[in-house]
Image (cartoon, grey):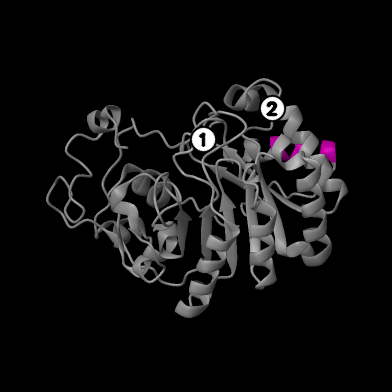
Amino acid sequence: MKDNTTANANIGKFSDPFVTAKGETRAHVALGDPETLWFNTGTLCNIECENCYIFSSPTNDALVYLTADEVSDYLDQLETRNWNVREIGFTGGEPFMNPEMVEMTRRALARGYDVLILTNAMRPMMRKRVQAGLLDLQETYGDKLTLRISVDHWNSDLHDKERGKGSFDLTIEGMAWLRDNGFRMAIAGRTVWGESDPDARAGYARLFAEHGFDIDAANPGQTVLFPEMDEAVEVPEITTDCWRILGKSQTDVMCSNSRMVVKHKGADHPSVIACTLLPFEPEFDLGQTLEDAERPVQLNHPHCAKFCVLGGASCSA
């Protein structure tokens, strides 16, 4: 999905997996110490955000629903491959659109993993059947389960600009239900608004205090602020020398410690993707099994540079 705007902004770049446009050796990242296995539960979502990196919407089923049995298969593979993963993450789309979301979560928790669910906390999560399932999981597994809520900005107008009028209030309603029932919560926001990190975190702190949410706005693990992923912006390619120049290590990049399972529409079997941000790029599809996915990842996409290496972002808790 490298569109024309990307090609124009980064003309000549990100074409050869092993060599940059300047003829330098492209950086790669080996899978070192896996910490998180992600499952994309499907791209269907109850809303359509203005800048959704995965184009989720009420009609986009490019990634179809995973089943609980498919999740169990990969959990079996984790044990066979001895990855020593500590966390299972679920993302979408909106995960609670998937009718087997609660059961998938249960199976991961039953194996002893911490589970992180990325959700907008809106109507799909607030259905009575889903609430009942979540309450049962909370009673059984407690703090092993965390829900990370998408709150794009602490100001309702800016949040609604991204997610649609009234979405902020519905998300706060869902968070209040989670608060009242003792669920562990975290927040995912955006840094596109032009404010400093301290100002953004101060705004979230006021929001959390106003509603009694037990979330630390100063803790990057509890309030995660993601850079915007604009493919039309020119970014540098990452070479093997960049690790030394930037003072960074391969282990700082999330493809060194995570993979994501997706199921493409029409596919017979799920596949394992190198990066949670690139589910539609063929060169980041590593194969159907975790064994296939143990090979190194070439940093051959603008997101690799802007979001991961230069931005220092991570999707895990």
Relative horizontal placement of residue 277, taking residue 165 as reference (left or right) = left
Position in image of residue 243 (x %, y %): 32, 60
Give the magenta-colored segment's residue range. Answer: 203-211
Position in image of residue 120 (x %, y %): 66, 39
Position in image of residue 234 (x %, y %): 29, 34
Q: Quadrant of the N terminus?
A: top left
The numbered mark at residue 56 is: 1
Q: CA distance from mark 1 to mark 2?
A: 16 Å
Q: Residues within 10 Å of mark 1 (few under 14, many from 20)?
A: many
Quadrant of residue 121 in the image? top right
Amino acid of disc 2: Ser
Amino acid of disc 1: Ser
- Can you tell which of label 1 and label 2 is closer to the viewer? 1
Q: Quadrant of the C terminus?
A: bottom right
Quadrant of residue 174 in the image? top right
- Most extreme residue toward the right is 180
Quadrant of residue 252 in the image? bottom left
Nearest the viewer among 199 and 72 is 72
* Magenta segment includes 206: yes
Which residue: 40% across, 33% down? 230
Which residue: 41% across, 64% down? 256
Of labels 1 and 2, earlier in sequence is: 1
Chief SS of the magenta region: helix
Q: Secondary structure at mark 1?
A: loop
The numbered mark at residue 129 is: none
The numbered mark at residue 167 is: 2
